[in-house]
Amino acid sequence: FDVLRKESLSFELRPSVEKALQAAEQTRIATEAAMEKSPRETSSDLIIGRSPAMQDVFKLIGRVARADAPVLITGESGVGKEVVANAVHKFSRRASAEYVAINCAAIPGNLLESELFGHEKGAFTGAVSQRVGRFEQCDGGTLFLDEIGDMPLEIQSKLLRVLQSGEFSRVGGNQTLTSNVRILAATNKHLEAEVEGGRFREDLFYRLNVVRIHIPPLRQRREDIRLLAEHFLSRQGEGSGIGRRMQFSPEAIDQLEHHDWPGNVRELENTIQRACVLATGNVLLPRDLPLGRVPRIGDRDGGLSGGSKSGQGSNGSVSLESAAQAFLQASKSDPTLGPALVAEREIIRAVLASTDDETAAAKQLGMTKAMLKKRRDQFQL
């Protein structure tokens, strides 16, 4: 607490209140970011894959789980690093002990030290009582440090001390505490480059890099895509309130397997969840999976405010106005087609008019080249 003198209230009260509110907000962020997670509580609690690369990951998890050595898990965002960390803990001798996951990038640097090591009452503004840190809480268990490449250098030195001796002190305290914690760390950064750039301690890197598990991106293990997609689809049908069982069409599977998935498994899961919510039938078609760039409404020179005479924007996109006019004219000229087919035909016609590349057109339309050819033949385009 701040103690203010009565004669200085007029100019000291406001800064003190603002500082207290800021401290409270930072504490809230830290609490949410460091919320405890059990391996059974994660949204994706299964590691799925039949590719040789993932089989190697499974074998490595089995070998390292029983040891107490630190494990460094690397890979791009969305590949499933936390799921692997959960598995290492689940199959370790510490499985019945505490498991806590902390995202080092989500907690402000000035609060991460307190989150890990605890603090004494009065150690800083907002420290109204003593707090036990995660190292004390996880004594005998496992601490997962996600995004460790974003940990500030000054905290890296304290983490190194714990790894070397098991000793640490709370923020603002003089007592030396000990903790027997297994460290699992994950990053999407190239830590060797971070060491070269002076952003990550070399000695800490070697302490963490005792065993490394690298998870390859989804584009390098395309044989896993169908397996993952069907798992996510079955889970959506069972527990998302959709109320119906769904399946993929062969063309949809083909489209999924040929997408590069820059967001990896997380992107695949989100794509299928969105498709299940928006699909009108029980079979997911390529058009339900908009993976490529679709024509954008409101592009410059291509929106309602106007556009080129050809109905295309300066970047080749189709304007909403020209597409609507084409739809109305087609509905009048061909009453034998239902509204849905007329709409599909005119959308395909507009996209084909905007590009000479059939592969790009199929990608924009969310269908394979074979399906696009079939539609062109059907609509005589």
Image (cartoon, helix red, strand yellow):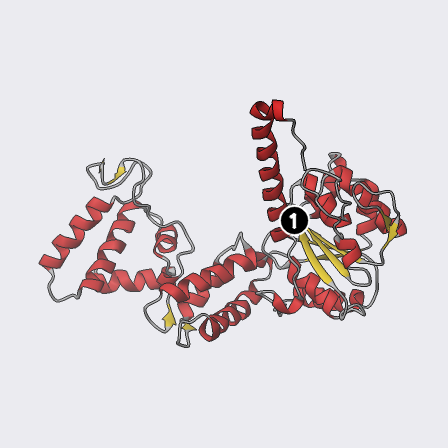
Residue topped by disc 1: 188
Q: On the picture, is 219 further left or further right than 2?
A: left
Above or below, comparing residue 312 to residue 372 in the picture: above
Q: Residue 250 or 284: which is nearer the viewer?
A: 284
Quadrant where the image shows the C terminus: bottom left
Q: Residue 33 or 214: which is nearer the viewer?
A: 33
- The tally of labels here is 1
| Residue at horizontal 56 percent and vertical 62 percent from the top | 222
Q: Residues within 10 Å of mark 1 (few under 14, many from 20)?
A: some
Quadrant where the image shows the N terminus: top right
Give the amino acid type for the residue marked by disc 1 in the picture: Asn
Q: On the picture, is 272 further left or further right than 264?
A: left
Above or below, comparing residue 149 to residue 228 in the picture: above
Q: Position of residue 144 (x, y in %)?
A: 72, 56
Q: Position of residue 302 (x, y in %)?
A: 27, 39
Q: Position of residue 21 (x, y in %)?
A: 58, 39
| Residue at horizontal 19 percent and vertical 37 percent from the top | 309
| Residue at horizontal 86 percent and vertical 46 percent from the top | 161
Q: Residue 369 or 211: which is nearer the viewer?
A: 211
Q: On the picture, is 286 further left or further right than 177?
A: left
For numbered disc 1, what is the local secondary structure? Answer: loop
